[in-house]
């Protein structure tokens, strides 16, 4: 019988395979997804699993491939595969979670040793689960095609971005800028070329706010 972690990895493998099957053979995008998938899998399947963030995946990928996608490219263009393995990581780390069961495992439940009444009930439940799984897969595809970020999913990078934003805001109090009741301003003490905000943090905040706006639009659309 497969272990709990093994089952989680197998489910993430299957989701990644479905993602790859939908892509054009020989395309650069497919090659990038394959590379990201391999690194994400290795990070989650470690003895001590690591959360596969866009930054960490990019760093790991560039150790062996100088043309590996950059952090922002992974975040913007390959978030689907990243999301699959982030979920796998959280499932692995949640030791209190019940072991997930796949559709194949449900279909393979042996009802031959059950009495006729129980067998009928289980067979009916298997049919219902199969039908619901198919409907969910279709719905997920519709959502993925129409909404870049799931309407119910705040980006998992939010905590990291907000912590960095907090550190930056607090640093302004000791910096070369002046804050009054109206605005944060450049002062006479501000040297030419003073850094306002790191490019990485600026890009992450832009991506975060873009995702937030898409989420809000998607939520409003579902209510109309």
Image (cartoon, helix red, strand yellow):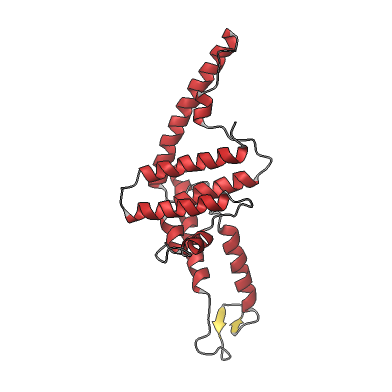
Can you tell which quarter of the image residue 16 is in? top left
Please name the residue shown 65% across and 39% down the image.
97
x, y (%) of residue 117? 58, 9
Q: Is residue 182 above or below residue 42?
A: below
Q: Is residue 48 left or right of residue 68?
A: right
Q: Residue furthest right?
A: 96
x, y (%) of residue 143? 42, 43
Please name the residue shown 69% across and 40% down the image.
96
Q: Is residue 168 above or below residue 174?
A: above
Please name the residue shown 53% across and 32% down the image.
102
Q: Residue furthest top?
A: 116
Instruction: Please say whether residue 99 is visible from this viewpoint.
Output: yes
Q: For the N terminus, which image quadrant?
A: top right
Q: Is residue 193 left or right of residue 138?
A: right
Q: Nearer the viewer, residue 209 or 219?
A: 209
- How many numbered discs, if any? 0
Q: Nearer the viewer, residue 218 or 20?
A: 20
Q: Is residue 222 above or below residue 164?
A: above
Q: For the C terminus, which image quadrant?
A: top left
x, y (%) of residue 195? 53, 81
Q: Nearer the viewer, residue 64 or 74?
A: 64
x, y (%) of residue 101? 56, 32
Instruction: Please say whether residue 143 is visible from this viewpoint.
Output: no
Q: Is residue 214 left or right of residue 179?
A: left
């Amino acid at each position: 019988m497969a272990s709990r972690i093994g089952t989680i990895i197998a489910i993430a493998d299957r989701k990644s395979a479905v993602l790859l099957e939908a892509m054009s053979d020989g395309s650069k995008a497919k090659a990038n997804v394959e590379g990201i998938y391999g690194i994400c899998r290795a990070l989650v399947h470690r003895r001590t699993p690591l959360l596969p963030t866009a930054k960490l995946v990019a760093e790991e990928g560039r150790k062996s491939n100088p043309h590996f996608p950059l952090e922002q490219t992974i975040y913007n263009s390959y978030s689907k595969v990243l999301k699959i393995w982030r979920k796998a990581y959280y499932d692995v780390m949640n030791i209190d979670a019940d072991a997930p069961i796949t559709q194949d495992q449900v279909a393979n439940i042996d009802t031959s040793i059950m009495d006729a009444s129980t067998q009928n009930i289980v067979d009916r439940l298997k049919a219902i689960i199969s039908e619901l799984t198919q409907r969910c897969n279709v719905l997920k595809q519709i959502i993925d095609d129409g909404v870049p970020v799931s309407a119910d999913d705040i980006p998992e990078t939010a905590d990291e971005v907000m912590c960095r934003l907090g550190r930056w805001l607090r640093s302004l109090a000791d910096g070369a800028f002046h804050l009054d009741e109206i605005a944060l301003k450049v002062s006479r003490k501000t040297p030419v070329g003073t850094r306002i905000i790191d490019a990485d943090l600026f890009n992450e905040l832009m991506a975060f706010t873009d995702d937030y706006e898409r989420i809000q639009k998607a939520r409003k659309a579902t209510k109309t």
